Structures are given as structure tokens and as C-alpha cells.
């Protein structure tokens, strides 16, 4: 591994290991964080349409082979994507839930697998003949899915032993004066609801992973648009839109890392993390609606209403 990142090397996750997703959940709603991480409420195992996971698997195998100088047929990576899909749905005995929450039929599942392969093919095709994605060359990725960790440097004020930890999708380079990291996303094909540099600028993930390098970081999001090849009724489209991956860029510097440390400090104090959450007083950050308790996307609405409902 290039210098600038420390691997967790199989270290067991501890309460004082803070991932970007954990910090982000607390930032959005500390009550949801409390239900998930403090009370440890586990929801029934549901597998939602695992297309993104399958595409990630196919791309990860492709990039690992490119880094090792291995050449394989496209069908091999499609098989890797399908195997990742099968692993996901095996967890729920073949029951998969679609975009609107309903259980999918076998035909719908088969169609979704075909779309997954179509999206992967768009990524694969973009790399042919030395192609790049808006100037980003995935062949420069040297490692994928790196479990990285860094102890928080609290500065002169000091602070309790705390670590930032997370799985970095793609490591390009951390040996130079500016680290280069990247992450793969699948997204709505309509660019209005897709990705942009502005959206990348707002990502806590990029800040946390940049902080773990210990230096300024250029962070790329490579986006695969989820183009449909089937109509809503299940018919195959005669001319589906091509899948054209694109790039959203952002950078992180000391200004961002100082702000990140301030947020971490607030998290540690608010949750009473190092006292086993004993004095943590969570609050629900509800999005008002006339049609229920809260309009946020959340797994804990029932528990939240029961605890905070006021009736």
C-alpha cells in the first residue's frame, strides 16, 4: 500500500472507531443514531434491489485485474457481479424488495439483473481503447476496498482516544503531496438528480477519507447512471439510452479537516461516547409532514414516534 494511509488489518471495530456513515447519521438525526448504535435495534433482514452492490463487485474485480496486469473477458466480470447479487438475495431466501418497497417477482428480478449487467457494460466499454471517464483513468487505481484507520489528532485542546475508520473504494495514490482517492456510485440517470461537483463538495465521506491520508486530497466520484432497459411494464426497450459514466470532483484541505475535527468533537461530547453513552440525550430531527410522524428516509420511525410522540 502507498504511504499516507494506515490499514486496519482486521482490527475489530470498537465504539471509538467512527465511520463517515456513523457520523453522518448522528449529524442528520441523533435519535436515529441512538436507536441504531446505542440501543442496537436490528431491523428484519430485508434485501433491497442489490444492483449497486453487484455493479461494485464487477468493477472491483476489473480494477484489481487491471492493476495486476490480468486480462479477462467481459463475461467474467458480469459473472462476478451476478455472484455478488446471488450472495445478497441468499440472505433473504430469494426475496428482494424493489424501489417502491414491494416484493419483486421473479421476472422483475431477472430484468433487474439484466440492467445491472447493462450498467457494468457501460463502465467496461468506457475503458476500451485506453478510454477515460472525463479524464479520470481507472487503470491508475492501485487498491480497492481499503479498510483504513487513523487516530484523531485533537490538537492543543487534547481529547479522548478516537479513531476515524472506513472502507475506501479506490486508492489511486497517497505517496505524493496531494493524495488521490475515488469512489464509485450508481445514480439516477437524470443529471438533475444525479451528481455534480457541488454535490461532491458537500460529501462528509470525502472529508473523512481525506483526513485519513493526513494530507490534501483530490477526491473523485465516478458515477454510473442507472439507465433503464425495460419499461415500467416489463417490456424491453427497443433503444435504451447508453450508459455513459461521468465524473464529479472535489478537493479537501486543512480548512475542511479542522471543521471535520470540530464536528467529531461535538459528536464525542454530545453522545458521551467514552462514557458508554451514559449522558447521551438524543433528539429527533423530524422533517414535518401531514402524512405521518416524519418525512425523512429512516428505519426507526415507529420507535421514534413511540418514544417522542407526545400523545
Image (cartoon, rainbow, N blue to C red):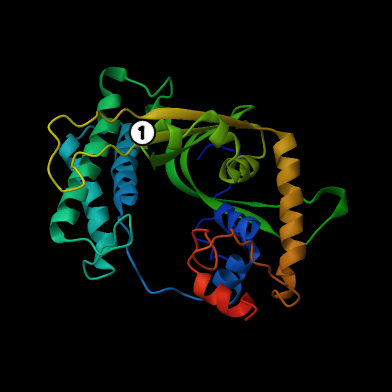
Residue drawn at 39 percent across, 40 percent down: 187
Find residue 73 and report its horizontal and vertical position in percent. 17, 34
152 vs 125, nearest the viewer: 125
Question: Going 12% across and 32% down the picture, which residue do you hit?
Answer: 238
Q: Which of 88 and 48 is in front in this view?
A: 48
Horizontal relation, residue 151 to residue 269: left or right: left
Where is residue 296 drawn, in percent x and y?
Answer: 53, 58
Numbered circles on residues, count: 1
Q: In which quarter of the image is residue 71?
A: top left
| Circle 1: element type | helix
Percent coordinates x, y for residue 276 in the rendering? 69, 75
**In the rendered image, which quarter is residue 235 located in?**
top left
The one of 58 and 113 positioned closer to us in this rendering:
113
Query: From the viewer's perspective, is 34 left or right of 190?
Result: right
Residue at the farthest front position? 290
Q: Taking 34 as reference, is 275 left or right? A: right
Residue 150 in the image, given as x and y percentages of width and height: 64, 50
- Whether residue 243 is situated above or below residue 98 in the rendered picture: above
Image quarter where the C terminus lies is: bottom right
Residue 14 visible in the shown view = no
- 221 above or below 9? above
Q: Does any portion of residue 159 appear in the rendered image?
A: yes
Q: Residues within 10 Å of mark 1 (few under 14, many from 20)?
A: some
Residue visible at 21% across and 49% down in the picture: 112
Q: Name the residue under label 1.
A: 67
Amino acid at each position: 500500500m502507498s504511504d499516507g494511509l494506515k490499514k486496519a488489518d482486521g482490527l475489530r471495530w470498537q465504539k471509538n472507531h467512527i465511520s463517515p456513515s456513523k457520523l453522518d447519521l448522528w449529524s442528520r438525526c441523533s435519535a436515529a443514531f441512538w436507536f441504531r448504535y446505542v440501543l442496537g435495534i436490528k431491523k428484519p433482514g430485508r434485501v433491497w434491489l442489490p444492483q449497486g452492490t453487484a455493479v461494485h463487485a464487477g468493477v472491483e474485480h476489473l480494477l484489481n485485474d487491471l492493476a495486476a496486469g490480468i486480462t479477462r473477458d467481459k463475461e467474467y466480470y458480469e459473472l462476478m457481479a451476478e455472484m455478488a447479487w446471488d450472495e445478497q438475495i441468499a440472505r433473504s431466501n430469494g426475496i428482494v424488495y424493489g424501489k417502491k418497497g414491494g416484493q419483486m417477482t421473479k421476472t422483475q428480478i431477472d430484468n433487474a439483473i439484466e440492467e445491472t449487467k447493462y450498467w457494468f457494460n457501460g463502465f467496461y466499454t468506457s475503458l476500451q481503447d485506453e478510454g477515460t471517464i472525463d479524464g479520470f483513468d481507472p487503470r491508475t487505481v492501485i487498491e480497492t476496498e481499503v479498510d483504513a484507520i487513523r487516530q484523531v489528532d485533537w490538537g492543543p485542546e487534547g481529547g479522548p482516544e478516537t479513531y476515524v475508520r472506513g472502507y475506501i473504494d479506490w486508492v489511486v495514490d497517497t505517496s505524493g503531496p496531494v493524495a488521490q482517492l475515488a469512489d464509485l456510485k450508481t445514480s439516477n440517470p437524470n443529471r438533475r438528480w444525479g451528481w455534480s461537483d457541488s454535490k461532491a463538495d458537500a460529501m462528509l465521506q470525502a472529508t473523512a477519507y481525506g483526513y485519513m491520508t493526513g494530507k490534501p486530497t483530490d477526491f473523485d466520484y465516478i458515477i454510473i447512471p442507472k439507465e433503464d432497459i425495460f419499461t415500467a411494464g416489463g417490456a424491453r426497450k427497443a433503444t435504451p439510452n447508453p450508459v455513459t459514466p461521468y465524473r464529479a470532483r472535489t478537493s479537501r484541505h486543512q480548512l475542511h479537516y479542522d471543521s471535520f475535527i470540530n464536528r467529531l468533537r461535538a459528536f464525542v461530547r454530545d453522545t458521551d461516547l467514552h462514557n458508554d453513552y451514559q449522558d447521551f440525550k438524543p433528539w429527533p430531527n423530524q422533517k414535518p409532514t401531514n402524512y405521518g410522524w416524519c418525512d425523512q428516509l429512516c428505519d426507526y420511525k415507529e420507535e421514534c414516534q413511540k418514544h417522542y410522540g407526545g400523545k
